[in-house]
Image (spheres, rainbow, N blue to C red):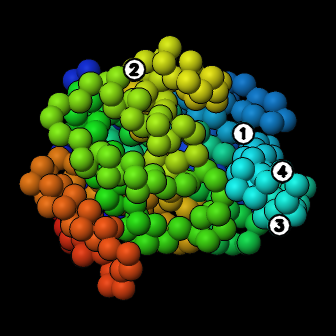
């Protein structure tokens, strides 16, 4: 297997596009993970404390290894807000929130935040993943407690809001297919972090005709998605484009401005022998392929609207087979 190369290989500055990965796992301690990074990537420890270490790798950049204490605590907090909104402040306890509270006392995952790496060089991460697996790292499927994921942060190819809108359209059409193809863990599905775009937003994107401004694109997004809790979180990009607007509307210091998408859907399956980061990345490339093909994107927009106008849909979505074919073709290149 290999890392698929999308058609847009340069970023909006004309430089080779880069991708950052974040992966969550358990059953190794901070010191073990730091040591593995140093050995497999020929890195050196720049700083270290009981909760975080930083490893510098010549020619690549700085990796952060941290204990993700926020994983359970913030998930429980977000779930509590959602539960109160849906069922009222005085409703019965949310059993999932109780489960998450117990999780916080049982396991604190490790998170590796990789620096942005050129798409053509992503295979440098394979030895790191292999060494972590050999050392005993465990991912999503190892335990009911382990609802861990992989986050992908691909740089934008250009700063034209029309092209960003095409990515959002393509993702919206693909999102149910993505759940199937990634085989997203059921426990992760009920966490708030990877919620899907509402269908009303996808339809609004499809209905919009003509060129779109950044202001219109951002305002429309915020109308339907005033939250970080999306499997495709575009707020870091929008804060990079218009910091004042995002701070005014959301005022959330966790939103970090950067010219990237933030894609959270894939499981971390690091315990599986055949799993590497390209498994997650190659599925993302289907979105990019669709966004770059106007005729096909228009066809699937029509199919999506027709299918979702029906009150009941028994047959599978007709565009799934098209996306399957795109995916297989990308893998065969």
How far apart are the alpha carbons under marks 1 and 4? Answer: 34 Å
Which part of the image, by quadrant, shows the C terminus? bottom left
Q: Which residue reaches farthest bottom?
A: 314
Among the 4 quarters of the image, the one containing residue 62: top right
Secondary structure of the residue carrying numbered label 4: loop
Which mark is first along the chain, 2 or 4?
4
Disc 3: which residue:
95
Disc 4: which residue:
89
Image position, residue 180 (x, y; %): 43, 72
Which mark is first along the chain, 4 or 1?
1
Q: Nearer the viewer, residue 291 or 110?
A: 291
Q: Are the residues tagged 4 and 2 within 8 Å (C-beta)?
A: no
Residue at image coords 34%, 31%: 217
Residue 303 visible to the viewer? yes
Marking on residue 66: 1
Q: Are the residues tagged 1 and 3 within 8 Å (C-beta)?
A: no
Q: Are the residues tagged 1 and 4 within 8 Å (C-beta)?
A: no
Label 2: few (<14), some (14–19) or many (≥20) C-alpha neighbours in 10 Å: some
Q: Which residue reaches farthest left?
A: 295
Which mark is first along the chain, 3 or 1?
1
Secondary structure of the residue carrying numbered label 2: helix
Residue at image coords 47%, 42%: 224
Disc 2: which residue:
241
Q: Nearer the viewer, mark 1 or mark 3?
A: 3
């Amino acid at each position: 297997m290999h890392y698929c190369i999308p058609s847009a290989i340069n970023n909006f500055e004309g430089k080779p596009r880069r991708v950052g990965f974040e992966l969550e796992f358990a059953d190794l301690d901070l010191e073990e993970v730091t040591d593995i990074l140093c050995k497999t990537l020929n890195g050196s420890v720049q700083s270290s404390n009981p909760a975080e270490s930083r490893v510098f790798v010549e020619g690549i950049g700085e990796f952060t290894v941290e204990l993700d204490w926020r994983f359970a605590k913030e998930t429980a907090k977000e779930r509590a807000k959602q539960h109160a909104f849906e069922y009222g402040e005085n409703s019965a306890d949310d059993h999932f929130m109780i489960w998450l509270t117990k999780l916080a006392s049982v396991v604190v995952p490790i998170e590796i935040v990789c620096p942005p790496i050129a798409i053509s060089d992503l295979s440098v991460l394979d030895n790191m993943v292999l060494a972590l697996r050999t050392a005993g790292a465990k991912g999503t499927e190892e335990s009911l407690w382990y609802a861990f994921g992989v986050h992908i942060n691909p740089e934008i190819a250009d700063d034209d809001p029309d092209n960003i809108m095409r990515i959002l359209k393509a993702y919206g059409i693909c999102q149910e297919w993505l759940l199937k193809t990634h085989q997203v863990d059921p426990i992760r599905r009920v966490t708030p972090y990877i919620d899907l775009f509402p269908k009303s937003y996808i339809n609004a994107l499809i209905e919009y005709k003509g060129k779109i401004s950044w202001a219109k694109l951002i305002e429309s997004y915020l109308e339907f998605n005033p939250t970080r809790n999306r499997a495709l979180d575009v707020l870091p990009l929008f804060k990079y484009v218009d910091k004042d607007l995002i701070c005014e509307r959301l005022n959330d210091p966790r939103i970090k401005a950067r010219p990237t998408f933030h894609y959270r859907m894939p499981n971390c399956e690091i315990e599986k022998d055949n799993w590497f980061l390209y498994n997650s990345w190659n599925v993302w490339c289907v979105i990019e392929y669709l966004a770059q093909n106007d005729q096909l994107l228009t066809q699937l927009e029509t199919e999506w609207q027709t299918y979702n106008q029906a009150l009941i849909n028994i047959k599978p979505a007709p565009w799934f087979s098209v996306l399957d074919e795109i995916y297989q073709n990308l893998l065969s290149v």
